[in-house]
Structure formats: structure tokens, C-alpha cells
Image (cartoon, rainbow, N blue to C red):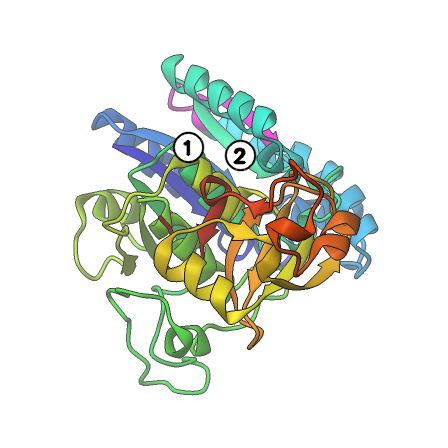
Amino acid sequence: MRVIVKIGTSSLTSESGQVNTTALSKLVSEVVAARAQGNEVVVVTSGAITAGVQRLGVERPDEAEVLQAISAVGQIDLMRAYGDEFDSHGVATGQVLLAPHDFRDRNQYLHAETTFRHLLRLNVVPVVNENDAVADDAIRYGDNDRIAALVANLLRADLLVLLTDTPGVLTADPRIEPNATLIEEIAAINESIEEVAGEAGSRGSGGMASKLAAARMASWSGVRTVIAAADRENVVADAIAGIAGTGTAVPARETHVAARKLWIGFAVSANGQITVDDGATSALSESGGSLLTAGIVEVEGTFGAGDAVEISSLSGEVFAKGLIAFDSETAQQWKGSRTEDLAPGTSPVAIHRDDLVLLDNPN
């Protein structure tokens, strides 16, 4: 089984910002044990910013640019701790720093996949962190939860384990409702489930909402997710075994999504939004057709040919995402145009169905 294990900042660092060696030792021991059972394991870690704040002896700043600089300092301490701990088990590790561009650009995406596969063939445990120091929008990704889901997608993993400081998704905020209980399985992540998700903690940038979003991404990728407590004994082994109550399980979708559509749906950020009429909404949602210029009502944002854009209905609901065939200026000029309105030989296809993914029912 191929497993992605992600540990959050609050589980890996102490209140003072230092790496929690007890928590790290436990995690590494469980990863080593899982590998001994024949599993391939990739670790996704947070904690570089918090470790950097502690190393520099400063208050955590609010400015994203300063946070990125501080992460460069903390990354050294964090990886040294991982390297030392895995070395004590005789296991080699390899650091992989990923930036948003590595997922947005198809070639970079494939190069990253190749690197991971070679590391795994070399019997190395990849330790992944976001390249906060240079990634322009890295701090907003959500405490590496999205990165973990994207890596699970990239590697066609079987399981994503999101380790946090709670037993999983609870029925209510335990700080307000002491009798809150664990939700052992979530068949579908909907608004009622999202309402119980808490805010991000002070030491991390993620929260339960971020983990649910990551689990949704993984589910569409055909990957089962378990959200569980990092301090639970044998949590990784129990998650792999599928033991009920280990945490909150989110099963993989039965419908398999083509790799290219997974990349469009999850790895590429949208640079604009296209609003379409009711006819186009039905054609895309029900018939699996392509988006034609005639169905475009409104164009927002600045984008180039081949960029990803969101597609929304007249009600404002974003229901699809795709790679558009022309830039935003052309889209503005051609919106609402039928084939006969365009120059001879001009294709009316704005987004081909092969470049489009439905966000509620990907196919």
C-alpha cells in the first residue's frame, strides 16, 4: 500500500515553537513500522515557520513575506530533526520542497512524480514540505493539507493520513460542547459537515476545514483519507488496517477520474471565472459537452490561452473548471457569439470537454 502521512504544526511543535521530539520520534517509529510491513510511505510535514520563529526569538509576524523568510530558517532545524530520527532506525530520507508552480505546470507535475518514484525505488522516505520561502501563495495553502492531498493524487496513493491534535472530526467544538463525539466516517463532505470544522490554530495555518477540503480532494483522486490524532498509539498502523474509530474516515469515490482531469481539478489554480447561461450549464453538467462561446455570459479575471478558469452558473454557483482555449480579452470579445458570428474557420469551443472537470461529479 502507498501511504501519505501528514503531520500538522500543532502536533509536531511545542507551545514554545521547538520541535516536539517525543511526537517526532513516535511518528518516525510508526512510519518505519509501516514500511516494515511492506508499505511505501511519504511524509508531509509542517512546522518550518514555527521552528523558525523559535530559532530567531521573534513573535510570529502577520506579513506573508516575513513568514516565508522565517520558514527558510526553521526548515533547517526541522529537517535536521527528521534526518536524525530516521537515521537512528537506519532509514534514509530525502527532502522534497514543493511550490504551487510544481503542480500548475504539467511538465513540472510529471517531473515531481518521477522524482518521488525514484526515491521510493531507492527505499528512501520522502519528507515533503511546501517551499514557503519562494512560493508566492504558499502560506495560504492550509498548513500543507492541500499539499498532502496533491501528493496523494500525484502518486496515486491508497491512503492519506492527516494527523492532528484532535481525534478526528467531532460532532461539535469540544471547547463549547464537552459531549462532542467522533464522527467515524463521512460518506460525503457537505455543508453540514463543513459547519462543524474549526478555525486554524495559532501555531499553524490549517484547521479542520482545511483537512476536510484535503480529504475531499483525495476522495476524488480515489484515495481514502483518515483524519486522526497524532498522539493516538499505533495510529498509522490502525489507519492502514482500516480499524473503525481510528479517526474520521473519508472513503475514496467509486468513480475513477482520469489523471488529466484530476490535475485540472486540483493541481491548477484558476486565473479567472466564466459565467455561462442555463443551456450551457445543462450541456456541461448533464450531457458532458464542451463549452461553446455562445454559452458564455460574463468573463472575469485576466488569463491566457491554456489557463484554468472556473465556470459558474447564472446563480453564481461554481460547478466546473477547465482549461480555456483563448485569453480573457478574446473571451470578452467572443462571449455569446455563435459559430456563424465568428470568422470562418474559427472554432467556437471555449473549453473542450477533455479539458473540463465537473466539481460535483467529476468524470
Q: Where residue 231 appears, x then y in whole percent?
A: 37, 54
The 10 Å Cα crowd at callout 1, few under 14, some 14 to 19, many 20 or more, is: many
Q: Please check the rendered image and state whether residue 64 is part of the magenta-colored stretch, yes or no.
A: no
- Of residues 70 and 98, the one drawn nearer to the viewer in this rendering: 98
Residue range corresponding to the magenta coloring: 86-97
- Residue 42's tag is 1
* Cβ atoms under marks 1 and 2 closer than 8 Å: yes
Total number of numbered discs in the rendering: 2
In three-dimensional space, the C-alpha distance between marks 1 and 2, rounded to whole angstroms, equals 8 Å
Q: Please tell me whether mark 1 sits on a helix, a strand or a loop.
A: strand
**Tag 1: residue type?**
Val
Going by the image, does 328 lie left or right of 100?
A: right
What amino acid does circle 2 point to?
A: Val
- Whether residue 170 appears in this view of the structure is yes
Q: Between residue 355 and residue 146, name the one nearer to us.
A: 355
Task: Between residue 289 and residue 64, name the one nearer to us.
Answer: 289
> Badge 2: few (under 14), some or many (20 or more) residues near its Cα, within 10 Å?
many
Q: Where is residue 191 in the image (x, y as percent from the top left)?
A: 42, 76
**Is residue 343 left or right of 160 when viewed as pictured?**
right
- Disc 2 element: strand
**Mark on residue 128?**
2
Q: In this view, does 135 lie above or below 195?
A: above
Give the quadrant of the N terminus: top left
Question: What residue do we see at 17% from left, 59% from top?
Answer: 244
Please state if 207 lies on the left or on the right of 162 as rendered: right
